[in-house]
């Protein structure tokens, strides 16, 4: 059989992160806005997951009329939540996407079509309203959530996710592949999802939610770890944000199985990720945090990328390209100092982007394999998208000049 091209996977990652490129041009969203958008994302994610249980594969038959009506209600609520959110470029397009989704459900379109439309709408919500869908720290292991699961989740979901009720079962690979780790995380926030109440998860920290998400993902993960070759073929899957935001169902078969195992065992991926790929991912998270107004987290991600990414690859890079190494040394120091000195926002964003671009160059030079080249192109296009977004963001933030009209 011919091999599935790898490029669509990275295009998918960029589309998932950027949602059409509009998000990065927007001023920072407040917490209430983010919670409202995240609630809509959760509703739409479960439209994608549950629709095949409501309608037959060919769309001619109705499997569960009550569930079908509930999913129609999910889309209606998501549309009403959008009406409450601030006006932004791209909002009208999102409204049209929700209208198309409602029409497809009404006409009982095939499950794959509805799933793609619902997930596209969820991703646009997340991008447009700047939802942080990847943790600032490396993902915790499932073991961190073991006692918490036994205390709060076992009664409903079973000892190992094997509850007898289909809607509570966490061991079905086909169903669990429809959800990203972020989708699991989102369910555990009572302001964003009605599945639980505040007594169950209202006091959980962000790290506890991510640990539970990792543990839940493990109930349906393959038993056998993927080969290291898969990490070279799909490098975006062994690091953040890809591991947190991508849905396995949307990937080629071999990538789907690999992601389902890796996201359940994130502690096993550190040695699979090239240090400069890790540095690029941390720079992405740092820039995202800075755009969200969290300069302390941005600084933390920058220094983490320096220590746990660039510093590990620097000796090899210094032998290969001393000039680029010296440039990266200087850029890292300058960006660090700019954040500490509270330099103008547009300058810091530009410094992030220049540093990312050179990390990509270094990654290409140290490991010029097909997998790394594809990853490099993905990061390159991400840098370009962020650059365009940054310019728009800066222009929107600048005071408007006075006109002659009142």
Image: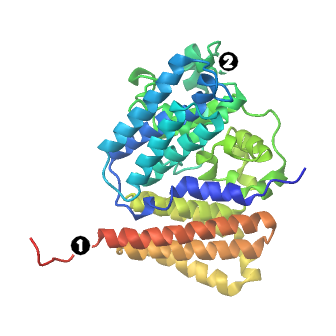
Q: Position of residue 134 (x, y in %)?
A: 54, 49
Closer to the camera in the image, 312 or 396: 396
**Based on the displayed image, in which of its 4 quarters is residue 53 positioned?**
top right
Left or right for 208, reference 347: right
Q: Is residue 332 visible?
A: no
Q: Residue furthest bottom?
A: 323
Considering only vertical position in the picture, is 244 above or below 72?
Answer: below
Quarter of the figure with residue 55: top right
Q: Give the residue drawn at x 67%, y 36%.
A: 177
Residue name at image x 69 percent, y 32 percent: 218
Q: Are marks 2 and 1 in contact (CB under 8 Å)?
A: no
* Up-down relation of residue 16 to residue 43 (above or below): below
The mark that comes first in sequence, 2 or 1, is 2
Depth check, front residue: 301 or 126:
126
Q: Is residue 339 above or below residue 293?
A: below
Residue at figure coordinates x 51%, y 48% from the top left: 123
- Residue 263, image x, y percentages: 67, 42
The residue under label 1 is 399
Q: Residues within 10 Å of mark 2 (few under 14, many from 20)?
A: some
Closer to the eye: label 2 or 1: 1
Residue 381 sits in quarter: bottom right
| Residue 161 in sight from this viewpoint | yes
Q: Residue at x 41, y 57 (%)?
A: 90
For mark 2, what is the residue? 162
Give the Cα distance between marks 2 and 1: 57 Å
Secondary structure found at label 1 = loop
Looking at the picture, how far across and down is residue 207, in whole percent? Answer: 51, 40
**Residue 44 relative to residue 323: left or right:** left
Q: Secondary structure at mark 2?
A: loop
Q: How many neighbours does mark 1 have within 10 angstroms: few (below 14), some (14-19), or many (20 or more)?
A: few
């Amino acid at each position: 059989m011919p091999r599935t091209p790898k490029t669509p996977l990275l295009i998918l990652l960029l589309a998932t992160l950027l949602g059409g490129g509009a998000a990065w041009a927007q001023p920072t969203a407040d917490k209430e806005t983010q919670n409202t958008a995240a609630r809509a994302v959760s509703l739409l994610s479960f439209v994608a997951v549950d629709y095949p249980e409501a309608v037959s594969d060919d769309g001619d038959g109705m499997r569960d009329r009550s569930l079908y009506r509930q999913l129609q209600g999910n889309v209606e609520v998501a549309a009403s939540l959008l009406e409450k959110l601030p006006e932004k470029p791209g909002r009208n397009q999102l409204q049209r996407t929700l209208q198309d989704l409602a029409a497809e459900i009404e006409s009982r379109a095939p499950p794959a079509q509805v799933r793609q439309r619902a997930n596209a709408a969820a991703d646009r919500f997340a991008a447009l309203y700047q939802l942080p869908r990847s943790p600032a720290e490396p993902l915790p292991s499932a073991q961190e959530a073991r006692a918490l699961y036994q205390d709060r989740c076992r009664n409903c979901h079973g000892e190992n996710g094997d509850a007898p009720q289909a809607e509570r079962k966490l061991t079905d690979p086909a169903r669990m592949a429809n959800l990203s780790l972020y989708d699991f995380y989102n369910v555990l926030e009572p302001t964003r999802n009605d599945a639980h109440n505040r007594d169950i998860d209202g006091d959980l920290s962000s790290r506890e939610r991510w640990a539970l998400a990792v543990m839940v993902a493990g109930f349906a993960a393959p038993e056998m770890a993927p080969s290291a070759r898969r990490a070279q073929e799909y490098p975006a899957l062994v690091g953040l944000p890809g591991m947190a935001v991508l849905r396995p169902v949307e990937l080629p078969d071999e990538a789907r199985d690999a992601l389902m195992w890796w996201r359940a065992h994130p502690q096993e991926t550190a040695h699979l990720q090239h240090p400069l790929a890790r540095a690029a991912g941390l720079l992405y998270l740092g820039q995202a945090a800075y755009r969200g107004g969290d300069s302390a987290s941005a600084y933390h991600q920058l220094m983490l990328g320096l220590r746990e990414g660039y510093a590990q690859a620097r000796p090899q890079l210094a032998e290969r390209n001393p000039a680029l190494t010296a440039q990266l040394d200087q850029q890292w120091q300058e960006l660090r100092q700019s954040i500490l000195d509270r330099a103008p926002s547009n300058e810091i964003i530009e410094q992030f982007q220049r540093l990312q671009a050179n990390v990509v160059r270094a990654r290409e030079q140290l490991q010029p394999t097909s997998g790394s080249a594809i990853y490099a192109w993905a990061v390159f296009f991400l840098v370009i998208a962020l650059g365009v977004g940054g310019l728009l963001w800066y222009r929107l933030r600048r005071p408007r000049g006075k006109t002659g009209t009142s």
